[in-house]
Amino acid sequence: MSVRSLVREVTPPLLWNLARQVLGKNGIEPSDRNRAEEGLPEFEWVGSDDEARPIGYVSKTLVESPVRFFPEMLNVIGGPQPYGCNPGELKSDTTTFWHQQVFPYAYVLGLCQSANRPLRILDWGGGLGLYWHLAKSLYPDLELDYHIHELEEFSQRGPDFTPEAHFHHESGDWEGDRFDLVIASGALQYAPDWRGILNQLAGVTARRMYLARTPILLEETEPRTILHRPRSYGYETDVLFRALPRSGVLDQVEALGLRLVREFIGAEEIVVHPDRTRVPFRGYLLEKV
């Protein structure tokens, strides 16, 4: 599997993979190297005329690529080799990316474990169940009551790859329930109403919430919309998502009764045209007050 394919497939389907990077000798370097078609940049700020277009995406090709590569992807998280390496390898181009995704998750799971009962998790936008497999690779004896909210196409295919998880495509299946840990990894930026989704997720959070792999504006106070052209990665559609203001996210979760426990710096950074703004990705572990 190529670096591009692997980094694409670790991204659950309620998010487009935003790890568009060129891997250099010294690690992962951000790049705008991918001009999708007709000289257009892969990531571009949209103007006011485009704001009416829906945030998120619908594409029949969305499920095909993860289904094809998921078994191979599991090879790089199983066994004693470094994360991101196939069995027998000592290093790969994706090692840094994997480690910066896996070990914050290990920290989160370590805080959430309970000796008395299975850990109840809602993974909003959890794809085919990658984070279930990561959890079991980190803590093999950890008992999980794992629920995944996804698009209907993935809820139908998910049990083929992660039969231990419960898949849902209707929020009514889990609203009113309570979870020890709620995860949204790389998905919040695709929600048309990201504040509403945060409110919904906070309502079912009994203990902690983990927002992972979210594009963040460190200095600005309002979200900005980005057009993503992922055609060279096999997806036959463009998509809009939002870079979210750090202050806005943290103010919102505080208003919902959550406090920041730890902030994580991700390995990903995208370059957005025309001003070539670098947008980093951050993660946030939050706890009920």
Image (cartoon, grey):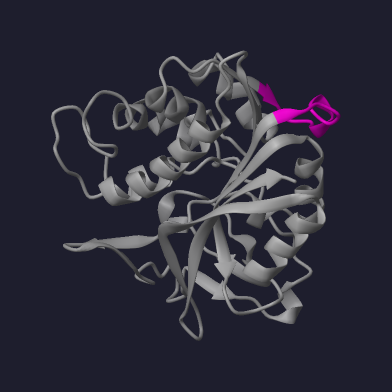
Q: Residue at x 38, y 49 (%)?
A: 100
Question: Does the image show residue 124?
Answer: no
Q: Is residue 45 above or below residue 117?
A: below
Report whether 180 appears left or right of 78.
right
**Residue 282 within the magenta-colored segment of the rendering:** no
User: Which part of the image, by quadrant, shows the N terminus?
Assistant: top left
The residue drawn where x is 58% and y is 35% is: 126
In the displayed structure image, the side of residue 285 where residue 90 appears, left or right? left
Residue 180 lies left or right of residue 66; in this view the side is: right
Q: How many marks?
A: 0
- In the picture shown, does residue 162 fall above or below 42? above
When asked about the image quadrant of residue 247, the answer is bottom right
Place of residue 226 in the rendered image (x, y in percent of width and height, measured from the top left): 60, 69
Toward the viewer: 153 or 185? 185
Residue occupying image coordinates x 53% and y 28%: 129
In the image, 216: left or right of 7?
A: right
Q: Look at the image and tell me whether residue 147 can be seen.
A: yes
* Residue 32 spot, x, y in % from top left: 39, 72
Residue 268 sits in quarter: bottom left
Tell which of 64 and 55 is nearer to you.
55
Q: Is residue 139 above or below residue 270?
A: above
Which residue does the image show at 45% across and 44% down from the upper left? 104
Provide the residue span drawn in magenta: 167-179
Image coordinates for residue 42, horizontal then vertical, percent? 47, 68
In front: 130, or 42?
A: 130
